[in-house]
Image: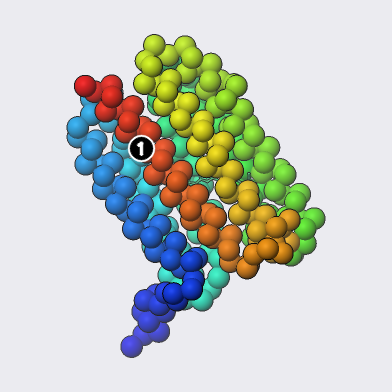
Amino acid sequence: MNTIFLDVMKIEVDDPVAFTFFTGYMSMLAASVFFFFERGQVDGKWKTSMLVSGLITGIAAVHYYYMRDYYASGNGTPVALRYIDWTLTVPLMCLEFYLLLKPAGAKASFMWKLIAASVLMLVAGYIGEAFTDGSTAHSVKWGVISAIGYVYVLYSAWLGEAKTLAAASNSPAVAKGINALAWFVLVGWAIYPIGYMAMPGGWLSGMFQPTDVNLFYNIADAINKIGFGLVVYGIATSESK
Ligand SMILES: *C/C=C(C)/C=C/C=C(C)/C=C/C1=C(C)CCCC1(C)C
């Protein structure tokens, strides 16, 4: 029998990283089915947002399918697959902010600034992880550059443009929803830099196994991608009554 097939079937009982790759895949897939079907139940103006929610978890599900096998086949951390996934899904999360705030007057430039900041965050993070020489200097340098992009999104959601637009919105559901997304960016997104610090060379590396970074990323992805979608779903259903 071919060995790849055997490898991907193997989850060790003491391997939480493998476990979260498998459950991550299943929960992303289930969430997509949910968002796509529920899209039919909401008012027309919310359908695009629901579609984007399903696309975010759907794109992640496909990447988890491959990352799971990559890891289970003994290749370690799937850095490239991870960042390809994020490069597609994080800009879609910026699009969610824009779609929700468009009725309150959000301009396309608002979305592009968020996307530019998240691309900076991801490109720097990728250089930090993919081109590591194992040194703390490399890890910290690119981690700090990446954090600049993150802080911009955080600032926009809590004090900047997104916050101002949400306050101007005449829909209490949208204002509440944007506030919930801001919490996700503050708490849920903060799990990623902690995971990054767990990689070899990172500030917390002494406390973790080299592949434990995946544990942080897998848990954070499930919280943030499914959570963002559920916030959008909550707004859409409460506004569709
Ligand atoms: C669905 C995927 C999401 C929401 C990914 C978010 C990723 C981050 C917020 C990553 C942030 C990072 C830093 C702030 C510094 C270290 C490098 C990163 C890329 C892990």
Identity of the residue furthest to the right in this view: 137
In the displayed structure, does residue 216 sit left or right of residue 88?
A: right
Q: Is mark 1 within 8 Å of ligand 1?
A: no
Decide if residue 175 is on the left or right side of residue 211. left
Local crowd size for mark 1, using a 10 Å CA cut-off: few (<14), some (14–19), many (≥20) = some
Is 123 on the left-hand or right-hand side of 65?
Answer: right
Image coords of residue 232 (percent x, y): 36, 32
* Tag 1: amino acid: Leu
Q: Quadrant of the C terminus?
A: top left
Secondary element at tag 1: helix
Residue at x-position 40% and y-position 84%: 3
Q: Is residue 103 above or below residue 155?
A: above
Q: Is residue 61 above or below residue 169?
A: below
Residue 129 percent across, percent down from the top left: 65, 58
Q: Nearer the viewer, residue 134 or 158?
A: 158
Residue named by callout 1: 230
